[in-house]
Image (cartoon, helix red, strand yellow):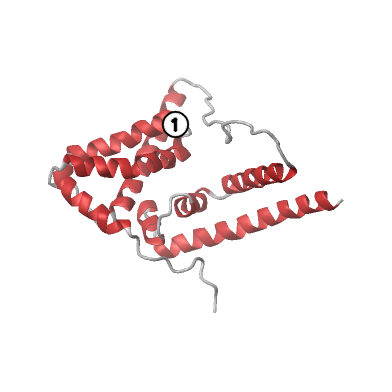
Amino acid sequence: MSTPLHPPAAPEAGDAADRELAARVQSGDAAAFEALFRRYFDRLAAFAEGYVRAPEAAEDLTVDVFVRIWERRAEWNLRGTPRSYLYTAVRNEALAWLRRRRMVERAHAESVRDGRPPAMGAAPESSDAGVEARELAEAADHAILQLPERSREAFVLLRKHGLSYAEIAETMGISVKTVEVHLGRAFKFLRAQLAAFLAVLLATVLH
């Protein structure tokens, strides 16, 4: 019998509350809209930043998603969870932002490199353990960036944003089985990459 890719997940405790908020938003409840905004804005903006690599643009496009929800609240038709809807909407907006930026770059014949350093600042190297922990974290981040795009996207939605397999499938527009394939590849690749890093680190320490 094959080992499951992940342990069975408990039902999301917030789903019912989210659905209630969404229903209230549809009826024009501004307080419910604010509550939904406060609950998800930060994590959605962080998710968008993973695509656009520009914090202000990520926040702006996330705001745009919420504004459109409020403006079209009476037509808001949820087929999945509010959370998966929000992640799907922000993902689509981020991809559209990237397409628009590429068009501008081509029009102006510019070669603009987006992104920023993965670390916001260098912490003092207070101990060997701290240095090793930072190096391991950097190795993990580097390994994630090396994943194929779709596998990386599924992995980030699972590990960093806590979406279920079904929600990842809805967000990415693929089947749950395909999500499992992408995540299986991601886990296998990351295990191999980090095992190699740890082997080198251990050999250095024991030398």
Front one among 203 and 179: 203
Front one among 103 and 190: 190
List x then y, in percent, for residue 11: 35, 64
Q: How many marks?
A: 1
Residue 136 visible in the snapshot: yes
Residue 75 visible in the snapshot: no
Placement of the N terminus among the 4 image quadrants:
bottom right
- Residue 76 lies, with reference to residue 181, above or below; the image says above
List x then y, in percent, for residue 158: 46, 55
Question: What amino acid is found at the position of numbered circle 1 in the picture?
Answer: Pro
Which residue is disc 1 drawn over?
A: 55
- Residue 83 lies, with reference to residue 5, above or below; the image says above
- Residue 203 lies, with reference to residue 11, above or below; the image says above
Q: Is residue 43 left or right of residue 76?
A: right
List x then y, in percent, for residue 154: 47, 53
Q: Residue furthest top?
A: 108
Residue pictured at 42% horizontal, 25% vertical:
104
The quarter holding residue 93 reads top left
Secondary structure type for disc 1: helix
The quarter holding residue 124 reads top right
Q: Is residue 85 left or right of residue 157?
A: left
Q: Is residue 30 left or right of residue 135?
A: left
List x then y, in percent, for residue 83: 32, 51
